[in-house]
């Protein structure tokens, strides 16, 4: 099982640094945002599983030749029915760290969800007081000097928020594009993905690639929403709408785009807007189906690799 531990440790290191950096710099991601988002999720899940699994396997190595037998022996040790003398100091440290990291990740995920839910609840209460209904169902209008458009997830209570200045600045076709863009965020549940990556960054703030991942995922989500808007709008109209909204876009708490504020929110927003506009103007073709299938297959295999090493007894043992 020692070989399993080292294999998982190597995979965790790759997924913690070079893989996210290379993916964030890849040009193909803008041609298939959906496939890229699936790969980002696979990297995050497989990385966390490998990190915890490596420490778990190392700690259990004296107790069995695979995870199942090792956990069974550990359970007996905890009940006082088995000898604990075989566990050395570093084995205990590894097991303790694996347990603490698991609890930390799950607790941070829950804590981030609670914080975001509270922010949304406060935001929704303010909108109830300050907004007026729009003719489009599920849309409200606020009085604001800047052109603003965003969505506030909440299941059946999800709403899209527009400012009156934005409605004055956009024509009917541009407004339709904006509503389609924001509506796709809600219908495709993009807030759940942002929640997961916000929690990942909150749990591991010392890992620089968590910030890289969060920015890349936010950008890809915006591109995916742009693709939905293009189904009801032409490129020129959408570009004008994106540019208009960008003029008044500020970092927001409680809205979809800023669940966990970035250190340099305005720079991130500007960079995302530039990338979106360049993508729309370039009109690059979508990634061919075989290449998309390759990315999706690689994502599945990436998740299966640490899972197989951990749950299949005796796959690799030393």
Image (cartoon, rainbow, N blue to C red):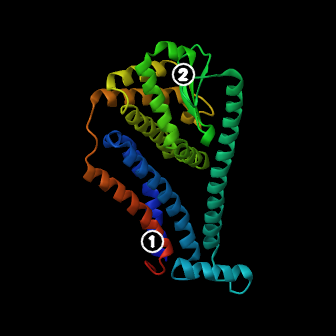
Q: Is 274 left, or right, of 185 in this rendering?
A: left
Q: CA gap, disc 2 to disc 1?
A: 47 Å
Mark 2 Cα-neighbour bin, 10 Å: few <14, some 14–19, many ≥20: many
Circles 2, 1 touching at the beta carbon (< 8 Å): no
Looking at the rendered structure, the secondary structure element under dot 2 is loop
- Dot 1 crowding, Cα within 10 Å, few <14, some 14–19, many 20+: few
Residue at 54% x, 77% y is 67
Q: Secondary structure at mark 1?
A: helix
Q: Position of residue 50 (x, y in %)?
A: 50, 63
**Rendered view: 66 above or below 144:** below
Q: Is residue 221 above or below residue 129?
A: below
Q: Residue at x 62, y 59 (%)?
A: 101
Residue 74: percent from left, percent from top = 64, 79
| Between discs 2 and 1, the one toward the N terminus | 2
Q: Nearer the viewer, residue 249 or 96?
A: 249
| Image side of residue 267 versus residue 113, left or right | left
User: Which residue shows up at 40% across the image and 51% down it?
Assistant: 19
Q: Which mark is residue 308?
A: 1
For label 2, the residue is 148
Q: Nearer the viewer, residue 122 or 8?
A: 122
Residue 142 image label:
none
Question: How many numbered discs, if any?
Answer: 2
Rendered image quadrant of residue 138: top right
**Above or below: residue 168 compared with residue 81:** above
Name above or below for residue 42 compared with residue 156: below
Name the residue located 28 percent from the left edge and 41 percent from the top edge: 286
Look at the image and tell me whether residue 102 can be seen.
Answer: yes
Q: Going by the picture, which residue comes out furthest to the right? A: 80
Q: Is 57 left or right of 225, judged from the image as shown?
A: right
Residue 280, x across and y down, in percent: 33, 29
Q: Nearer the viewer, mark 2 or mark 1?
A: 2
């Amino acid at each position: 099982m020692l070989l399993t531990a080292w294999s998982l440790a190597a995979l965790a290191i790759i997924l913690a640094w070079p893989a996210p950096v290379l993916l964030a710099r890849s040009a193909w991601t803008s041609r298939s945002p959906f496939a890229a988002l699936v790969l980002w999720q696979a990297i995050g899940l497989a990385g966390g599983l490998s990190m915890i699994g490596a420490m778990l396997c190392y700690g259990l190595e004296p107790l069995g030749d695979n995870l199942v037998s090792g956990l069974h022996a550990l359970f007996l040790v905890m009940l006082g029915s088995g000898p604990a003398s075989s566990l050395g100091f570093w084995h205990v440290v590894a097991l303790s760290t694996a347990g603490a990291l698991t609890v930390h990740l799950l607790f941070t995920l829950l804590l981030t969800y609670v914080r975001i839910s509270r922010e949304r609840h406060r935001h929704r209460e303010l909108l109830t007081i300050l907004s007026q209904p729009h003719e489009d169902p599920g849309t409200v209008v606020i009085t604001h000097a800047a052109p603003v458009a965003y969505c506030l997830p909440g299941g059946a209570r999800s709403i899209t928020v527009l400012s009156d200045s934005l409605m004055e600045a956009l024509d009917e076709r541009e407004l339709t594009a904006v509503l389609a863009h924001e509506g796709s965020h809600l219908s495709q549940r993009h807030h759940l993905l942002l929640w997961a990556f916000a929690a990942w960054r909150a749990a591991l703030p010392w890992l620089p690639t968590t910030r890289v991942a969060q920015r890349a995922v936010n950008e890809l989500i915006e591109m995916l929403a742009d693709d939905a808007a293009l189904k009801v709008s032409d490129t020129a109209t959408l570009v004008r709408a994106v540019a208009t909204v960008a003029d008044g876009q500020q970092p927001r708490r409680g809205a979809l785009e800023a669940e966990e504020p970035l250190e340099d929110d305005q720079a991130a927003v500007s960079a995302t807007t530039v990338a979106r506009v360049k993508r729309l103007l370039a009109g690059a073709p979508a990634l061919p189906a075989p290449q998309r299938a390759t990315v999706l297959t690689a994502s599945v295999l990436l998740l299966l690799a640490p899972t197989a090493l951990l749950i299949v007894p005796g796959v690799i043992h030393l």
